[in-house]
Amino acid sequence: MTVEIPPQHEASLANSDLRPDEGWNVLYVDGEWVRPDHDRTLSVRDPSTGDELTTVPAGTEADTDRAFESADEAQSEWADATPAERAGVLREVASLLEEHEDELVRLLGLEAGGCRAKSAIECGITQELVSLTSSLPYRVNGEQSGSPIPGKQNNVLREPVGVVGVITPWNYPLNLALRAIAPALALGNAVVLKPDEKTPVVGGLALARLFEEAGLPDGLFNVVPGRGEEVGDHLSSHEDASVVSFTGSTEVGYTIAENAAENLTPPLLELGGNCPHVVLEDADVDRAIDAGVFGSFIHQGQGCISINRHLVHESLYDEYVERLAERAEALPIGDPLDPETVIGPIIDDGQRDRIVSLVEESREEGAVVRAGGDHDGRFVEPTVLSGVDNNMPIADCEHFGPIAPVIPFETDEEAVRLANDTEYGLAASVHSESERRAWEVADEIDAGMIHLNDQPVNDDPHTPFGGVKSSGLGRYNDQWMISELTETKWVSVQQSSREYPF
């Protein structure tokens, strides 16, 4: 295979309408675009070509401390702001996301390698999420109750936690940042964000521009790009962080949780997945394959909720593999900025090498390549493998690539056993013409999110998003964020004289 990328590939971000006047090599702290007092930088590279797009600061612990100080000072006044004030800022951000959608789609293609279809979906979901989140300030409800003590009234209030530290990944940088930032601000908190080193513009500094334009008061949203082992570790162990939100690998998630535990800071974690796509013997094969193609290959399989394993009943197995392979071979590969492209680049050489190695190791153990299997630079062909078992390298981990291993099973019980034979429990899908049967199988699968006659790549902003086992702690989206980002306070009122025993 050969992939041609246009010269220059619009590689400069200098003409972005979201670029600060100072350029991208800045921090955003206390409502100001600040050039750091050091010359350490991160090179932001185009995953299609490896060319440098721009540089941003490689923030330090001192930069992070300044961001937390600004956030802490600004938060109390914001907590006292009216629901209308907080909601108004978020409604304006939602409007700006729509206004700048074309540019955000371009940035997602340049920085994250997302093809236009994927990036447009991400922008649309994010607009809906922020719009829905603007209602949260009006939905923080307390409770009032009586007491076994005569004359006492109990009140349970919900108050902002304070400053929320947010660490985000590169694969869906816009959505996975704002799903934490927007509700944190809506609920009266301040935020310090460390975006991923690979996507600090569209996942960080460009967001600061949107909140600045929306009129968010200074200090409430701060962006400190930097390396995970420095800024990420310092943020997650910071004494002023009231909650730490992290989306990323399970391995790093354990470190984040350990860091947060030093200060008894609650972690909110959405971690890895090994998502099964279960096709029962009475499934509609057309629907199952349509869903399987999308769930495996959107964004080159670089998603925690992408299909990692296709578990297919033995009676449908041969037909399913053949047709899935035909569909995979027909997917256009190339420049993510080309509207016709479906398969763009893998994010970097290291991840490309890992995917290629997993496929090769599985071939050595007996897997058969039925489609794809080749690569050109960072472009990996959508690959379908048959003859796979659950213990092969490509199936027993989160491969994070455009690879579709297909595993046969004989009974529903075996399908459930295979689906659960993983440390992860994020998302899954089950196909059957009998909704009752699909429900019965889904009920036995250990996952936080299961989709019947669909595929796992779903995120509705008004539903709880999160997993079980090693896939994380807590739930994102809508009312569930009220629980995560506020704390309860019990205030009792003794309304009449009380008799004490002494």
Image (cartoon, helix red, strand yellow):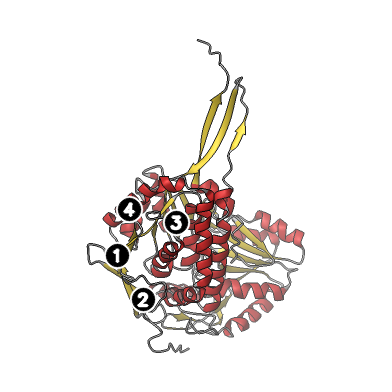
Between 287 and 188, the one nearer to me in the picture: 188
Between 263 and 193, the one nearer to me in the picture: 193
| Number of other residues with Cα within 10 Å of mark 1, as a class: few under 14, some 14 to 19, many 20 or more | many
Disc sitting over residue 246 in the figure: 3
| Number of other residues with Cα within 10 Å of mark 2, as a class: few under 14, some 14 to 19, many 20 or more | many
Q: Are marks 1 and 4 in contact (CB under 8 Å)?
A: no
Give the residue at mark 1.
58
Q: CA distance from mark 2 to mark 1?
A: 14 Å
Return the disc, 1 or 4, that comes first in the chain's sequence.
1
Q: CA distance from mark 2 to mark 3?
A: 23 Å
Return the disc, 2 or 4, that comes first in the chain's sequence.
2
| Number of other residues with Cα within 10 Å of mark 3, as a class: few under 14, some 14 to 19, many 20 or more | many
Q: Tell me the element at label 2.
A: strand
Residue 8 in which image quadrant: bottom left
Return the disc, 1 or 3, that comes first in the chain's sequence.
1
Disc sitting over residue 234 in the figure: 4
Give the residue at mark 2.
45
Q: Position of residue 447 (x, y in %)?
A: 59, 56
